[in-house]
Image: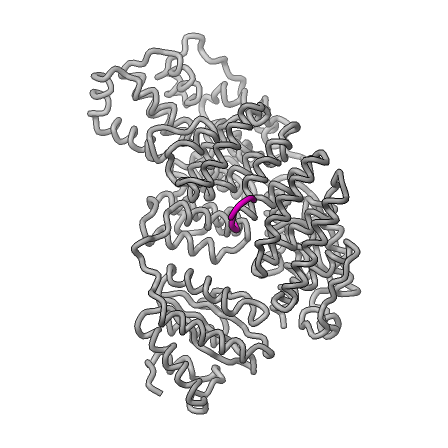
Amino acid sequence: MDISSDVAAFYRPPNEVDLAALSEESAGLVRTLAARLAAGKRTLLPAMAAGKTRWYGLAPDSREGRLLAEEVQAWLAPPVGNSAIRVGPGGDALDEAACRAAPDGVCLRIDVESTWRSEARTNVRSMLDVWQSAPERGMDVPRPVGRVLRDFFAALGARDRTAAQAAIDEIRTRSLLSAANVRFLRVHLIGTLGSPLEMRDDPDLKDIAKFRRPPAVTGHLARAADALFIAPRLSGDVATVVDWAKVAGVVEDEWPGLVSHPSQVDSVAAARCLALSESLAAEPRHAVCQALEAEWNADPVVAAVLARLPSVASTPAQATIAGLCQRGDFEAALDLAGGASLKDKDAVSVLHAAFNLGDAQSAARAVALVDGLDGAERHLLLDRAVERNLYQQLVDINAGQHVPRDWTDWLTGDWPDRPDVLSEWAAGWDRTSMLDEGWADGMVLALVDALAGDQRGRTRNGLPILVEWLCDPDGLLPGAVGPAVTVLDVMLEGDGGRSERRAGLRLAEEILRAGCAAGEFADIATALDQVLSALGSREADWLIESLDVLLFSTVPDEVPRRDLVAAAHSVAVQWFDRLTGTQTILLAKLFTAAGLDFPVPPSDPVSGEGRRRQHPFRRVGIYSLAESAAMRARQWIEEQWPGTNVTLAHDHVNSDRLEAMARNCDVVVVQTSHAKHAAVAALETAAGPGDKLLRVNGRGATSLVRGLLERAADAV
């Protein structure tokens, strides 16, 4: 067969496909697919290992790899094969051979069920026909940076590290963001899906503390520092016997100046880092100590460190902008500058103060103050290289000279498509404003217009951030349920896509958790019912999580819930032949809880008696702050694998129980959407290297059980 040497090498053992023994039709298919690889195009190649069929997807770069992943999902998705996984060095021998065939590109693997081999070949031929007859999707209309960033944060939420890294690679390759911002995305990736040790040791993050960082990046670093150097020194809540000066020196050596201002503190970990940093100062700052005392003194570490600081004098009554800046009281310097008539020297101090703070709101305040100078003074200030460079860096922080005032302003204005920057802007907007009836009406009308107009793409990219802002870590504000229901209705109506559905489900869960009136629940049910009518089987996982939220939440009226579950049952029955074994099992459990039949096929390899007898897990640990979901998951796991011992934990911080669970269980499932970072870090440390920790993200018990079912399938 006339093929390249790389492809010929791929078809040597351990690949069990014998090219010489193939029929003429099959050999022609392999030749055509191999020719695409030689031409630098994305393609597929068949393989066989231990009697099991695989299809390897090969692409020359990350963009082509993303397109191939979408196509493979459409043509070879379950039940034909499993979901595509990205392979690289470190896989089995056949994976290694496939990677060598596309050494600088992307390699995907799809394991095909034995009963679907013929259909897989037919679908590959159909895909090849499409490739040959349709024009290639060119590079003339590249994805905007906002879309790539949205996919990046969506991948973090889905715990898909491969997809998140692919988004970073695309941003770096296409130079969509600066090198510093690419590093910041790397911090987000490791802080969400990696470990504190990886954060410390990653070579790409060397000297990351020397950069002026967004608050979220500082937060990830502070949590890593807490998990590595601070929390392990605690014995229970006893912090007074620890040499915190020594700990402060260790943190400072690793990440110098990590947290240096109260405005950077958004967690206990950041407060601890700030307190330790202040303990190293020759003259601790009054404003910093006062802020820590007022907000974080309940934490034993903060309290112990503050107790050892010498008493500090009050801020001088005649404080000046330059003096405050020299003392490091940068927030106070900006506050004072906002109420004064700036001169050249003070304007320089304002630029330095905002630059040291490094957040979007401070940058915008400083830029506005400089822009308000007299024309001649402003020209003189920016004519100097240092000040001009500082000013430009502050502008770059916000991707412009100004920031939106609130959500309505963002929806109606012409702002950059930067979800990462929007997240910083939104952090400074007053959440209580949603309780104002006029604000809510104006914001919802603006959202309707934005989703229907030219700003639709940018608006869709910002929807997950809008939902995060509405919900906050502590849930919806009392009285905000009505506006949230209206926002949900707008998000799900019309031709909304996957982004709207994912964000809408999160919002619906928070609304039901907060409690809503019968009329509001009827609106939620109507919005979800409209989604069902346009849903395809590829969204089965979304349907499963929606049913989980709907069935096990308290609702004010059973009739809309019963009707919606019945409609979902009808849709799921139509999908039956296209569902994976895991999806079928979860739907059966959900519909059983609702009093409806949805049988699991006896031939399903995941649920069969052979799998039950195989007992892939003897001891399972579950960590989730959603206690009712964890208890339901325990019941379903014990039904699926009788005799399995399931341990639950809901601790907010490290504890002996968490450590014992991590050591003694075969697998520990961590529901990251309902978890505290300190507890997760403790589990990572106790579990040690390997894959004992199974991180899942999603709603309810189904996400926990899905993770175990997929782990069990991979073990075969």
Decide: is 286 above or below 526: above
Callout count: 0
Q: Is residue 324 left or right of residue 686?
A: left
Name the spot of residue 522 as percent of width and height, x first.
Answer: 69, 40
Question: Would residue 495 be counted in the magenta stretch?
Answer: yes
Q: Can you see residue 196?
A: no
Residues 368 and 178: in front is 368
Decide: is 309 above or below 128: above
> Magenta span: helix, strand or loop, mainly?
loop
Name the spot of residue 166 as percent of width and height, x first.
Answer: 42, 56
Q: Please give the name of the residue rendered at 68% of the width and 72% of the height, measured from the top-left corner.
A: 604
Which color scheme does this rendered protein use?
Answer: one colour
Name the spot of residue 697 as percent of width and height, x first.
Answer: 60, 51
Q: Please give the name of the residue rendered at 63% of the width and 73% of the height, measured from the top-left corner.
A: 716
Q: Is residue 486 left or right of residue 60?
A: right
Q: Please give the name of the residue rendered at 55% of the width and 25% of the height, measured from the top-left corner.
A: 433
- The single residue placed furthest to the bottom in the displayed view is 21
Q: Quadrant of residue 588?
A: bottom right
Name the spot of residue 524 as percent of width and height, x first.
Answer: 65, 41
Q: Can you see residue 608?
A: yes
Q: Please give the name of the residue rendered at 36% of the width and 62% of the height, measured from the top-left corner.
A: 61
Question: Would residue 589 be counted in the magenta stretch?
Answer: no
State the quadrant of the N terminus: bottom left
- Residue range highlighted in magenta: 493-498
Decide: is 531 above or below 249: below
Residues 57 and 32: in front is 32
Decide: is 122 above or below 538: below
